[in-house]
Structures are given as C-alpha cells and as structure tokens.
Amino acid sequence: MRLVLRGGRLLDGAGDRGVHDLYVRDGVIEGLDLGGAVDQEVDAEGRLVTPAFLDLHVHLRDPGQEVKEDLASGLAAAAAGGYGTVVSMANTDPVVDDPGIVADLVARAARVAGARLRPAAAISKGLRGEELTDMAALRAAGAVMVTDDGVPVADSRLFRSACEYAAELGLVVQTHSEEPSLRDGGVMHEGAVSQRLGLPGNPDAAEAVMIFRDGEVARLTGARVHLAHVSSRRGLEVATWLKASGAPVTVEVTPQHLTLTDESLAGFDPVYKVAPPLRTADDVAALRAALAGGAVDSIGTDHAPHTLAEKQQDMLSAPFGIANLEVAFPLLYTRLVAAGELPLERLLWLLQDGPARVMGWPAPRLDPGAPADVTVLDLETERAVEGARFRSKAKHTPWEGEPLKGWPVATLVAGRAVHLAG
C-alpha cells in the first residue's frame, strides 16, 4: 500500500521541513517528493502535517462498560482527535488485572480501525489497594503501564512494592494523586465557589500531599512515576520541587484543567464534574504558565465518557469525567497557540515527544523509515464544537458551541488512513 499526503507543511520535533509531498509505503514513511504511482492520495495543501499525537491517559470503558464507550468508538474518537496511540486505563468491569484481559484487549483493538491501543493494567487486584497484580505476566501480555487511576493507592507500603516491581520490569507507574481522607466526599474544588454553592469540596492539599508521597516513593525505588492530571498550583509546585531534587517523576496536565475553572460549576451542571476537580483561575494560570518550561512533560486527555443519563444526575450522584479526545487539540490550539500564549511547536511537543519520552518510546518523526503515524491539521478553518458529531458515544461536552480552529482532517496509523474528515 502506497499513499501520499499532498502539499502539506511538514513539522515535527526536529523542526519545520517546509511544504512537501509526504510518501508512505507499507506502514512506514518512504520519503519526500518522490513521485510515482500511489494507491491513495490525501490533499494536505494549506494544512499542517505532523506526527500523530500520543495520549497516555484514556478511559475506553471496555470491557464491561460498553454502553459508555467501546474499543471501536473510543479508538475512532482518538483518531478523529489526531491521536495515533492511546494508553487505556484499567478501571473497567472487570478490572484489567489479569493477563488474559490484557491480551484480549490487544487482539480486539488490532481488528479495529482507529488509533493504536497500548493498554495499562491495574496496580492492585480489583483496584482494591490490598494485593498487587502479577505485573510481569501483565507486561508479557502487552501492558505498558500500571495504574489504579480513578482510585488513589492509599497504602504506601503497597505503592512502594508496586514501584519496586515496576522498576525491575521497566513499566511506568501512573498515579491518581489524591489523599483519600482529605479528598473524602468532595465533588468540586474546595474554596469560595464550593462554599457559595453549598457543595462538598476537595482541597488542593489532597493533591499536593499525595504527589509528595508518590514522588518520594519514586525517589526511594527508582521507579518511573507519572503524575497524572496535576490540577493545582500547589500540586505543581510540589511536583516541580520533586523533579528538581532528583525524583524520577513526570507531570501530566489535561485540557480541562488548562481551560475551565470551578466557576464553571455555578450552574450545578455535572458535565463539569471531574476528578481531580476543576480548580481556580489562579490554578489554571499556573498550569498554563508551566507549559512553556520543563515542569510539564505531557498533556493527557483523561478522556472519561459516561452516558448522558448518568451526567444528568445531581452533582452529588453524577460520575466524574469529561469526554474530550476529539476536541483536545483544537481547544488547546485555539485557547493557547492562536491566542499567542504558547508556541505551536511546544504544544506539539507536549502531545508527541513529551509523552514518548515519559514511556521511553522513540520520538515521533517524519523521517524515512519512521512509522507512518501522521495527522493532518487544519489550522485556519473555524468550526463550532458539536457533540452530536463525536465518534465517541459520549456526545455531551463542556465546550459545546465554542468556535475552534485546528481540527484534525486526517490521521494515519501505520500508514492506514483511519480518519478522513468528511
């Protein structure tokens, strides 16, 4: 199979390569401006051609919660968002704590047209925080990460043991850094807005305390610990101190924590209910300022789809989570890059080289011989967010109706066009 992306501006972590025809053959990049017969042609004129994004943090709800999302819908949504590879979380039903479940996910995902799946497995059996999973067997079955995301690992001795085993096996440990007894029953950020609304709050101290614990255990064991969805100024300050003092931790932030605040919940709409919660404008400003430096290593979506009926419950009962795979890049491009707050190259790095470095994977490039995982972005055309058009089963979104630029119009995975707009 030979394909050409015709007339796009090529940009990757090695720099701006100018306008070229990019040729792909049998799943890898063949070269530039080669000419000759092709089996498929994609018009990229006036658009940006760049390596497909990597997301280390998605909830695909499969197995067992397919009414919310399944592999087909979730991987199609990822491809529509410009993602070539996603790491799925383990908090499914049953939990991904058995090698057979990992192997089944890998096999079924290989038959689905969409982004490439790299599953994470659970740290503890059943996410109960009591007994470790067999990480060696999970890794052999295809798991690339261990995490109890959604549930903090409260037992520090268990977390230490998990990090020791993961370090031996070369697995990344991803955290859900919220101290449970401080988090308690909070449904939003604890502060002036929660007090005004009369809703139970979750303080930023819960995040900061647990990030310190997780980072110190990383230092103790040498494990690569990825601090997921850091949401607050205090949490970021602790993470930055840990990194500066030599702890092997990396930091992820999400589109929602970069663009929304706790004031969004003033209307009691659970579409804005996430864990960790949306914080204050000061927290958002701190996270955004950190993107340009070395404090943040990657942007992960924490795509967390639920049914509309679930999200239409009251604030105390509705589940945590936002579905955002398909709007992540347009949202961040419009709010940060087009607004002059962040260079395009840095945003791309946080979606490409950054997550690859976290995982120890090769940096995504457009060089001959590199895997043909590529996305084509329309940076000029403005289109309003329409949840009804999402490939995801979750078609409700906090950004409904917002005009955005930067929409992915094509995505290739291993040289195969898995998303073509229109």
Image: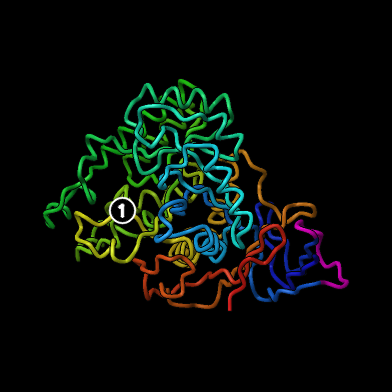
Q: Secondary structure at mark 1?
A: loop
In the displayed orientation, state which residue is furthest to the right: 36
Q: Which residues are magenta?
A: 26-38
- Compared across the picture, whether 309 is left or right of 149 comes to left
Q: Quadrant of the C terminus?
A: bottom right
Side (left or right) of 265 relative to 242: left
Asked whether, in this view, residue 129 is left or right of residue 198, the answer is right
Which residue is at a point 49% across and 45% down the rendered structure image? 293
Residue 267 coordinates in the image, percent (x, y):
20, 66
User: Residue 33 in magenta?
Assistant: yes
146 vs 366, nearest the viewer: 146
The chief SS type of the magenta part is: loop
Residue 122 location, quadrant: top left
Q: Residue at x 40, y 27 (%)?
A: 131
Residue closer to the observer: 151 or 142: 142
Please rate how many residues cluster around mark 1, counting C-alpha atoms within 10 Å: few if below 14, some from 14 to 19, many from 20: many
Looking at the rendering, which quadrant does residue 272 occupy? bottom left
Q: Residue 153 in the image: x percent, y percent?
A: 35, 32
Amino acid type indicated by mark 1: Phe
In what quadrant of the picture does the N terminus appear?
A: bottom right
Q: Examine the rendered structure and indicate whether residue 43 appears above or below residue 319.
A: below
Label 1 belongs to which residue? 320
Q: Is residue 208 above or below residue 193?
A: above
Q: Closest to the observer: 143 or 273? A: 143
Does 154 lie within the magenta span? Answer: no
At a point 76% along the width and 54% down the height, the residue shown is 367
Q: Is residue 369 left or right of residue 92?
A: right
